[in-house]
Amino acid sequence: MPSFTTVDHDVAKRLRVAHLTGRLVTGTAGDHAFTMARIRSVRRDIAAAVPRWTIDIDEDGAASD
């Protein structure tokens, strides 16, 4: 299960909504591109000086072209 970290609150919020509603999403995170992937979790690192979120992505059912 790929994961990435972001400090962008808007990205974390949008992916958290996708996780809660069960939506499939398409996007990129650094060097990793995902298509029709399900967000498995969005976790905030409360100990970080700058708010930071770790997003886990499940690509088991990902469609690829």
Image (spheres, rainbow, N blue to C red):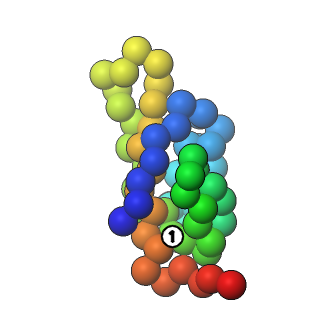
Give percent across and percent down for residue 44.
40, 36
Name the residue rendered at 55%, 57% in the picture: 32
Image coordinates of residue 6 in percent, x first then y, are: 52, 37
State the residue lying farthest toward the top. Answer: 49
What residue appears at the point 54 percent right and 71 percent down from the top-left corner? 37
The local crowd at label 1, few if under 14, some if 14 to 19, many if 20 or more residues have their Cα within 10 Å, is many
The quarter of the rendered structure image containing the C terminus is bottom right
Q: Is the residue 48 above or below the residue 65 in the image?
A: above
The single residue placed furthest to the left in the displayed view is 47
Q: Is residue 24 left or right of residue 65?
A: left
In the image shown, does 54 or 44 lie closer to the viewer? 54
> What count of labels does the image hold?
1
Check disc 1 and give the amino acid type: Arg
Q: Quadrant of residue 45?
A: top left
Judged left or right of residue 16, residue 46 is left
Residue at the spot 41% in from the left edge and 60% down from the top edge:
2
Q: Nearer the viewer, residue 46 or 21?
A: 46
Residue that mark 1 sits on: 38
Name the quarter where the N terminus is drawn: bottom left
Query: In percent of the image, x 66 and y 66: which residue is there?
Result: 26
Secondary structure of the residue carrying tag 1 is strand
3 up-or-down from 12: above or below: below
Q: Is residue 54 visible?
A: yes
- Residue 13 left/right relative to 53: right
Q: Position of residue 30 (x, y in %)?
A: 57, 47
**Camera sees residue 23:** no
Residue 12 percent across, percent down from the top left? 56, 43
